[in-house]
Structures are given as structure tokens and as C-alpha cells.
Image (spheres, rainbow, N blue to C red):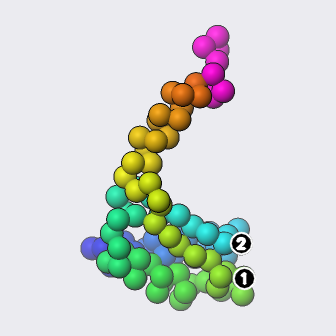
Amino acid sequence: AMARAGRALGIAIASAVNLCDLDLVTVGGGLSQAGDLLFGPLEEALREHTRMGFAGRVRVVPAALGQDAGLVGAAALVIGADKYWCPSL
């Protein structure tokens, strides 16, 4: 299942890279901790499906925050609430 997920994700990322000329793609959440089970097939499919010359330089990396990313994002919204929304709306 992880190999199939990695392959599907690699193909999806390749499509985005071919359209948007990305240099770096970050995989977050629980998937970021899957290691080679996910990232091996992902990289293989990515290299197989990137068609443009510039797409070959893209790097796919796990998010540094891992599963804590949502929690950190929620805390940032609370701390900076006045910058993100206005109570009068």
C-alpha cells in the first residue's frame, strides 16, 4: 500500500513540477515519517514522469515539523489572530 501511495504521489508531484517549475516539494503530516517505504517509490515515479529538463532538479523532502505541523499552524493563528481575521466581519 505504501509503495502504491508513493508512486501515486510521485506522479502527482511530477505533474505539478512539469507545470509549475518547482524546486522543492515538502511532504507533511504522517506521510513525512514513512521514510523509504513511501519516498523510494515516490522518487522513482517522480523521475520517470518529469518530462521537462528543469523538472529534474526538484527535491522532495519530509516536512521538518512532521505531525506537529497542524498544531504549530493552529498556534500561529491564535497568536497572530488580529493579523488573519477581524472580529467585526
Compare residues 7 and 37 and report the one nearer the observer. Answer: 37
User: Judging from the image, what secondary structure is the residue with disc 1 in?
Assistant: helix
Rendered residue at 46%/86% (across/down): 44
Residue 37, image x and y in percent? 32, 77
| Residue 21 badge | 2
Residue extending farthest to the top is 88
What main secondary structure does the magenta stretch of the protein show? loop
Identify the mark nearer the N-term, 1 or 2.
2
Residue 47, image x and y in percent? 55, 86
Rendered residue at 27%/73% (across/down): 1
Q: Disc 1 marks which amino acid?
A: Phe
Image height of 78 relative to 54, above or below: above
**How many circles with numbers are drawn on the protein?**
2
Disc 1 designates what residue? Answer: 54
Residue 66, image x and y in percent? 40, 56
Image-based side of 76 in relation to 29, left or right: right
Q: Disc 2 marks which amino acid?
A: Asp
Q: Is residue 5 magenta?
A: no
Rendered residue at 58%/25% (across/down): 81
Image-based side of 71 in relation to 56, left or right: left
Image-based side of 54 in relation to 79, left or right: right
Marks 2 and 1: in contact by CB < 8 Å?
yes
Q: Is residue 7 visible?
A: no
Occupied quadrant, residue 17: bottom right
User: Disc 1 and disc 2: Cα gap in Å?
Assistant: 7 Å
- The residue range painted magenta reads 82-89
Disc 1 packing (10 Å; few <14; some 14–19; many ≥20)? few
Residue 21, image x and y in percent? 71, 72
Rendered residue at 64%/14% (across/down): 89
